[in-house]
Image: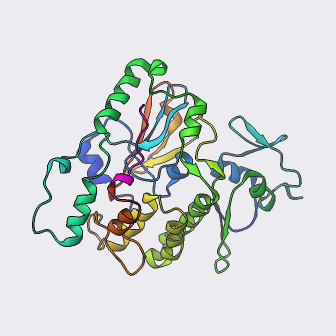
Protein backbone atom coordinates (compact mmCIF):
# COMPACT_ATOMS: atom_id res chain seq x y z
CA UNK A 1 0.00 0.00 0.00
CA UNK A 2 2.87 2.26 -0.65
CA UNK A 3 1.31 5.17 -2.54
CA UNK A 4 4.61 5.49 -4.40
CA UNK A 5 4.20 2.11 -6.09
CA UNK A 6 2.10 3.43 -8.99
CA UNK A 7 4.45 6.36 -9.67
CA UNK A 8 6.68 4.64 -12.25
CA UNK A 9 3.64 3.57 -14.25
CA UNK A 10 2.02 7.00 -14.07
CA UNK A 11 5.20 8.76 -15.08
CA UNK A 12 5.81 6.35 -17.93
CA UNK A 13 2.30 6.91 -19.24
CA UNK A 14 2.56 10.69 -18.76
CA UNK A 15 -1.23 11.01 -18.86
CA UNK A 16 -3.20 14.18 -19.42
CA UNK A 17 -5.89 12.94 -17.04
CA UNK A 18 -5.76 12.80 -13.24
CA UNK A 19 -4.23 9.68 -11.72
CA UNK A 20 -5.41 9.18 -8.17
CA UNK A 21 -4.20 6.90 -5.41
CA UNK A 22 -6.72 4.74 -3.53
CA UNK A 23 -4.83 2.96 -0.76
CA UNK A 24 -7.98 2.48 1.30
CA UNK A 25 -10.07 0.84 -1.45
CA UNK A 26 -12.61 3.64 -1.32
CA UNK A 27 -13.58 2.97 -4.91
CA UNK A 28 -14.21 -0.69 -4.07
CA UNK A 29 -16.85 0.38 -1.57
CA UNK A 30 -18.34 3.15 -3.66
CA UNK A 31 -18.47 1.52 -7.06
CA UNK A 32 -18.05 -2.21 -6.50
CA UNK A 33 -14.63 -2.75 -8.02
CA UNK A 34 -13.50 -6.30 -7.29
CA UNK A 35 -10.54 -6.62 -9.65
CA UNK A 36 -8.37 -4.54 -11.94
CA UNK A 37 -8.76 -3.19 -14.49
CA UNK A 38 -12.38 -2.28 -13.91
CA UNK A 39 -14.18 0.94 -14.75
CA UNK A 40 -17.36 2.92 -14.40
CA UNK A 41 -18.61 5.44 -16.94
CA UNK A 42 -19.90 8.76 -15.60
CA UNK A 43 -21.65 11.25 -17.85
CA UNK A 44 -21.41 15.02 -17.91
CA UNK A 45 -24.15 15.34 -15.29
CA UNK A 46 -22.41 13.09 -12.80
CA UNK A 47 -24.62 10.08 -13.55
CA UNK A 48 -23.09 6.62 -13.78
CA UNK A 49 -24.08 5.15 -17.15
CA UNK A 50 -22.15 1.88 -16.86
CA UNK A 51 -21.42 0.14 -13.55
CA UNK A 52 -18.16 -1.49 -12.56
CA UNK A 53 -17.04 -4.10 -15.08
CA UNK A 54 -13.85 -5.43 -16.60
CA UNK A 55 -12.15 -2.65 -18.52
CA UNK A 56 -9.38 -4.12 -20.63
CA UNK A 57 -8.92 -1.96 -23.72
CA UNK A 58 -5.86 -3.58 -25.22
CA UNK A 59 -5.50 -7.17 -26.29
CA UNK A 60 -2.71 -8.70 -24.26
CA UNK A 61 0.29 -9.93 -26.27
CA UNK A 62 0.29 -12.96 -23.98
CA UNK A 63 -2.68 -14.28 -25.92
CA UNK A 64 -0.62 -14.68 -29.06
CA UNK A 65 2.30 -16.33 -27.31
CA UNK A 66 2.79 -20.01 -26.85
CA UNK A 67 3.53 -20.91 -23.26
CA UNK A 68 7.34 -20.88 -23.15
CA UNK A 69 8.96 -24.17 -22.40
CA UNK A 70 10.99 -24.67 -19.30
CA UNK A 71 9.05 -22.38 -17.03
CA UNK A 72 8.74 -23.30 -13.38
CA UNK A 73 5.57 -25.33 -12.96
CA UNK A 74 3.51 -22.73 -11.13
CA UNK A 75 4.51 -19.95 -13.51
CA UNK A 76 3.60 -22.13 -16.47
CA UNK A 77 0.22 -22.90 -14.95
CA UNK A 78 -0.37 -19.21 -14.22
CA UNK A 79 0.52 -18.36 -17.80
CA UNK A 80 -2.04 -20.89 -19.04
CA UNK A 81 -4.76 -19.34 -16.90
CA UNK A 82 -3.91 -15.77 -17.96
CA UNK A 83 -4.34 -16.83 -21.58
CA UNK A 84 -7.87 -17.95 -20.70
CA UNK A 85 -9.04 -14.50 -19.56
CA UNK A 86 -12.07 -13.49 -21.64
CA UNK A 87 -10.94 -11.27 -24.48
CA UNK A 88 -13.19 -8.22 -24.41
CA UNK A 89 -10.66 -5.50 -25.16
CA UNK A 90 -11.66 -4.66 -28.72
CA UNK A 91 -15.38 -4.67 -27.98
CA UNK A 92 -15.03 -2.61 -24.81
CA UNK A 93 -12.81 -0.06 -26.47
CA UNK A 94 -15.29 0.24 -29.33
CA UNK A 95 -18.09 0.76 -26.81
CA UNK A 96 -16.18 3.59 -25.17
CA UNK A 97 -15.67 5.27 -28.53
CA UNK A 98 -19.35 4.89 -29.32
CA UNK A 99 -20.27 6.57 -26.02
CA UNK A 100 -17.82 9.39 -26.62
CA UNK A 101 -19.36 10.04 -30.02
CA UNK A 102 -23.01 9.47 -29.22
CA UNK A 103 -23.35 10.27 -25.53
CA UNK A 104 -26.74 9.38 -24.10
CA UNK A 105 -27.79 8.00 -27.50
CA UNK A 106 -25.13 5.34 -27.32
CA UNK A 107 -26.66 1.92 -26.80
CA UNK A 108 -23.90 1.30 -24.29
CA UNK A 109 -25.06 4.12 -22.01
CA UNK A 110 -27.47 2.50 -19.58
CA UNK A 111 -30.48 3.85 -17.73
CA UNK A 112 -30.13 4.49 -14.00
CA UNK A 113 -32.23 1.44 -13.17
CA UNK A 114 -30.10 -0.72 -15.43
CA UNK A 115 -26.91 0.66 -13.92
CA UNK A 116 -28.08 -0.28 -10.46
CA UNK A 117 -29.35 -3.70 -11.54
CA UNK A 118 -26.08 -4.52 -13.27
CA UNK A 119 -23.86 -3.33 -10.43
CA UNK A 120 -22.04 -5.93 -8.37
CA UNK A 121 -24.11 -7.86 -5.85
CA UNK A 122 -23.44 -6.87 -2.29
CA UNK A 123 -24.73 -9.42 0.20
CA UNK A 124 -24.07 -9.01 3.89
CA UNK A 125 -20.94 -11.13 3.60
CA UNK A 126 -19.40 -8.61 1.21
CA UNK A 127 -20.20 -5.74 3.55
CA UNK A 128 -18.54 -7.62 6.38
CA UNK A 129 -15.59 -8.31 4.12
CA UNK A 130 -15.24 -4.60 3.44
CA UNK A 131 -15.29 -3.85 7.16
CA UNK A 132 -12.66 -6.51 7.87
CA UNK A 133 -10.52 -5.29 5.01
CA UNK A 134 -10.71 -1.72 6.27
CA UNK A 135 -9.62 -2.77 9.75
CA UNK A 136 -6.75 -4.74 8.29
CA UNK A 137 -5.70 -1.75 6.25
CA UNK A 138 -5.83 0.41 9.36
CA UNK A 139 -3.60 -2.00 11.25
CA UNK A 140 -1.24 -2.41 8.32
CA UNK A 141 -0.29 1.26 8.54
CA UNK A 142 1.23 0.75 11.98
CA UNK A 143 1.90 -2.97 12.19
CA UNK A 144 2.56 -4.19 8.68
CA UNK A 145 1.51 -7.52 7.19
CA UNK A 146 1.37 -9.48 10.43
CA UNK A 147 -1.06 -7.01 11.97
CA UNK A 148 -3.25 -6.86 8.90
CA UNK A 149 -3.29 -10.52 7.95
CA UNK A 150 -5.95 -11.85 10.38
CA UNK A 151 -8.42 -9.25 9.13
CA UNK A 152 -7.50 -9.59 5.48
CA UNK A 153 -7.79 -13.37 5.69
CA UNK A 154 -11.34 -12.98 6.92
CA UNK A 155 -12.09 -10.48 4.14
CA UNK A 156 -10.83 -13.06 1.63
CA UNK A 157 -13.05 -15.74 3.14
CA UNK A 158 -16.12 -13.53 3.16
CA UNK A 159 -15.67 -12.17 -0.34
CA UNK A 160 -13.62 -14.67 -2.34
CA UNK A 161 -14.48 -12.98 -5.65
CA UNK A 162 -12.86 -9.74 -4.56
CA UNK A 163 -9.45 -10.04 -6.16
CA UNK A 164 -8.33 -6.59 -5.06
CA UNK A 165 -8.46 -7.71 -1.42
CA UNK A 166 -6.51 -10.83 -2.26
CA UNK A 167 -3.95 -9.52 -4.69
CA UNK A 168 -3.02 -6.59 -2.52
CA UNK A 169 -2.57 -8.73 0.55
CA UNK A 170 -0.62 -11.41 -1.29
CA UNK A 171 1.56 -8.90 -3.10
CA UNK A 172 2.49 -7.19 0.14
CA UNK A 173 3.40 -10.55 1.64
CA UNK A 174 5.46 -11.78 -1.29
CA UNK A 175 7.22 -8.56 -2.34
CA UNK A 176 10.60 -7.93 -0.71
CA UNK A 177 11.02 -4.51 0.85
CA UNK A 178 11.89 -1.89 -1.71
CA UNK A 179 11.23 -4.14 -4.69
CA UNK A 180 8.56 -3.65 -7.37
CA UNK A 181 5.28 -5.34 -6.47
CA UNK A 182 5.28 -9.08 -7.04
CA UNK A 183 2.92 -10.02 -9.85
CA UNK A 184 2.83 -13.78 -9.32
CA UNK A 185 1.63 -13.71 -5.71
CA UNK A 186 2.45 -17.27 -4.82
CA UNK A 187 1.92 -19.23 -1.60
CA UNK A 188 2.83 -17.57 1.68
CA UNK A 189 2.68 -18.50 5.34
CA UNK A 190 0.32 -15.60 6.03
CA UNK A 191 -2.53 -16.56 3.73
CA UNK A 192 -4.27 -19.78 2.81
CA UNK A 193 -4.70 -18.62 -0.75
CA UNK A 194 -2.52 -17.47 -3.59
CA UNK A 195 -3.16 -16.27 -7.11
CA UNK A 196 -2.88 -19.52 -9.04
CA UNK A 197 -4.71 -21.80 -6.64
CA UNK A 198 -7.50 -19.30 -6.03
CA UNK A 199 -7.99 -18.71 -9.74
CA UNK A 200 -8.18 -22.43 -10.34
CA UNK A 201 -10.64 -22.83 -7.47
CA UNK A 202 -12.80 -20.10 -8.97
CA UNK A 203 -13.05 -22.00 -12.26
CA UNK A 204 -9.93 -20.85 -14.03
CA UNK A 205 -8.97 -17.80 -16.00
CA UNK A 206 -12.31 -17.82 -17.77
CA UNK A 207 -13.98 -16.83 -14.51
CA UNK A 208 -11.45 -14.22 -13.42
CA UNK A 209 -12.85 -11.17 -15.17
CA UNK A 210 -16.15 -9.35 -14.67
CA UNK A 211 -17.04 -9.53 -18.35
CA UNK A 212 -18.77 -6.36 -19.59
CA UNK A 213 -22.24 -7.06 -20.91
CA UNK A 214 -22.16 -5.19 -24.19
CA UNK A 215 -25.07 -7.00 -25.77
CA UNK B 1 -15.44 3.78 8.42
CA UNK B 2 -13.46 3.10 11.56
CA UNK B 3 -14.61 4.53 14.86
CA UNK B 4 -13.61 4.23 18.49
CA UNK B 5 -17.15 4.55 19.76
CA UNK B 6 -20.61 3.74 18.47
CA UNK B 7 -21.57 7.38 19.13
CA UNK B 8 -20.20 9.60 16.41
CA UNK B 9 -20.48 13.11 15.18
CA UNK B 10 -23.04 13.39 12.36
CA UNK B 11 -20.61 15.40 10.26
CA UNK B 12 -17.95 12.74 10.61
CA UNK B 13 -20.45 10.07 9.59
CA UNK B 14 -21.57 12.12 6.60
CA UNK B 15 -18.01 12.67 5.45
CA UNK B 16 -17.22 8.97 5.68
CA UNK B 17 -20.43 7.48 4.27
CA UNK B 18 -22.32 10.17 2.40
CA UNK B 19 -25.28 9.90 4.78
CA UNK B 20 -26.15 13.38 6.02
CA UNK B 21 -28.23 14.03 9.11
CA UNK B 22 -31.38 16.04 8.30
CA UNK B 23 -34.72 16.57 10.03
CA UNK B 24 -36.14 13.68 7.98
CA UNK B 25 -33.40 11.35 9.16
CA UNK B 26 -30.25 10.28 7.38
CA UNK B 27 -30.25 11.20 3.69
CA UNK B 28 -28.11 10.20 0.74
CA UNK B 29 -28.82 11.04 -2.90
CA UNK B 30 -32.64 10.71 -3.20
CA UNK B 31 -33.08 8.51 -0.14
CA UNK B 32 -33.90 9.47 3.39
CA UNK B 33 -34.11 6.97 6.21
CA UNK B 34 -35.79 7.94 9.48
CA UNK B 35 -33.71 7.10 12.51
CA UNK B 36 -36.03 7.29 15.53
CA UNK B 37 -33.97 7.20 18.70
CA UNK B 38 -30.86 7.47 16.59
CA UNK B 39 -29.60 10.73 18.08
CA UNK B 40 -28.08 10.78 21.56
CA UNK B 41 -28.70 13.52 24.09
CA UNK B 42 -25.35 14.97 23.10
CA UNK B 43 -26.43 15.28 19.48
CA UNK B 44 -24.33 12.36 18.32
CA UNK B 45 -25.47 9.55 16.06
CA UNK B 46 -26.12 6.31 17.88
CA UNK B 47 -24.55 3.90 15.41
CA UNK B 48 -26.24 0.93 17.04
CA UNK B 49 -29.48 2.36 15.66
CA UNK B 50 -28.05 3.75 12.45
CA UNK B 51 -26.32 0.63 11.18
CA UNK B 52 -29.45 -1.41 11.65
CA UNK B 53 -31.59 1.13 9.80
CA UNK B 54 -29.10 1.50 6.95
CA UNK B 55 -28.13 -2.15 6.68
CA UNK B 56 -24.46 -1.62 7.47
CA UNK B 57 -22.51 -4.47 9.02
CA UNK B 58 -20.23 -3.77 11.98
CA UNK B 59 -17.01 -5.52 12.91
CA UNK B 60 -15.63 -4.96 16.41
CA UNK B 61 -12.07 -5.66 17.45
CA UNK B 62 -12.35 -6.30 21.17
CA UNK B 63 -8.58 -6.01 21.62
CA UNK B 64 -8.24 -2.51 20.25
CA UNK B 65 -11.81 -1.38 20.86
CA UNK B 66 -12.18 -0.23 17.27
CA UNK B 67 -15.30 -0.71 15.19
CA UNK B 68 -15.36 -0.92 11.40
CA UNK B 69 -18.64 0.09 9.79
CA UNK B 70 -19.10 -1.59 6.43
CA UNK B 71 -21.08 -0.26 3.47
CA UNK B 72 -24.82 -0.73 3.07
CA UNK B 73 -25.46 -4.23 1.86
CA UNK B 74 -28.14 -6.76 1.14
CA UNK B 75 -28.64 -5.64 -2.44
CA UNK B 76 -26.27 -4.17 -4.98
CA UNK B 77 -23.06 -2.17 -4.78
CA UNK B 78 -24.92 0.79 -6.30
CA UNK B 79 -28.17 2.00 -4.81
CA UNK B 80 -28.19 5.08 -7.00
CA UNK B 81 -26.79 5.93 -10.41
CA UNK B 82 -25.65 9.31 -9.11
CA UNK B 83 -21.89 9.16 -8.90
CA UNK B 84 -20.87 9.49 -5.25
CA UNK B 85 -18.57 12.19 -4.00
CA UNK B 86 -15.01 10.99 -4.24
CA UNK B 87 -11.92 12.93 -3.27
CA UNK B 88 -8.58 11.20 -3.53
CA UNK B 89 -5.01 12.39 -3.80
CA UNK B 90 -2.74 12.10 -6.79
CA UNK B 91 0.69 10.56 -6.50
CA UNK B 92 2.12 13.90 -5.33
CA UNK B 93 -0.45 14.22 -2.57
CA UNK B 94 -2.62 16.83 -4.29
CA UNK B 95 -6.34 16.32 -3.58
CA UNK B 96 -8.68 15.84 -6.51
CA UNK B 97 -12.47 15.85 -6.32
CA UNK B 98 -14.23 13.71 -8.90
CA UNK B 99 -16.93 16.39 -9.04
CA UNK B 100 -14.40 18.54 -10.90
CA UNK B 101 -15.12 16.33 -13.90
CA UNK B 102 -18.74 17.52 -14.14
CA UNK B 103 -19.42 18.72 -17.64
CA UNK B 104 -17.17 16.01 -19.12
CA UNK B 105 -17.59 12.32 -19.72
CA UNK B 106 -15.46 10.41 -17.23
CA UNK B 107 -14.06 6.94 -17.55
CA UNK B 108 -13.00 6.04 -14.02
CA UNK B 109 -10.61 3.12 -14.34
CA UNK B 110 -9.17 1.19 -11.42
CA UNK B 111 -5.77 -0.42 -11.93
CA UNK B 112 -2.94 -1.48 -9.66
CA UNK B 113 0.80 -1.91 -9.64
CA UNK B 114 0.32 -5.54 -8.65
Q: Which of A185/A175 is in front? A: A185
Q: Nearer the viewer, residue A108 or B114?
A: A108
Quadrant into which the N terminus of chain A falls: bottom left
Q: Is residue A210 magenta?
A: yes
Residue A208 in view, yes or no? no
Residue B66, compared with residue B12, is above or below; it is: below
Measuring from the top left, give residue A124's x and y in whole percent: 64, 58
Is A5 above or below relative to A32? Answer: below
Residue name at image x 61 percent, y 32 percent: A113
> Residue A75: x percent and y percent?
22, 67
Q: Position of residue A108 (x, y in %)?
A: 44, 27
Q: How is the image coloured?
A: rainbow
Most extreme residue toward the left is A69
Q: Write the residue at 61% across / 58% down.
A: A127
Numbered range of the magenta stretch: A206-215
Chief secondary structure of the magenta portion: loop
- Magenta span includes B16: no
Amino acid sequence: MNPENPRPFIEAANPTHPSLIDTEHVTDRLFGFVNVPMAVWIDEDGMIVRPAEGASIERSPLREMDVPEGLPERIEKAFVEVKKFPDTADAYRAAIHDWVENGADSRFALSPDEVIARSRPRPVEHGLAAAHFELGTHYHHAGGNDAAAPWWREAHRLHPENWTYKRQAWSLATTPEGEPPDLLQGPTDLYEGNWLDDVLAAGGGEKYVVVPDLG
Amino acid sequence: MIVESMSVDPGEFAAATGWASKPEGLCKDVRCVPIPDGITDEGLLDLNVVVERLGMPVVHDADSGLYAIGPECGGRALTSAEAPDVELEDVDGNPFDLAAMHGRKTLLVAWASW
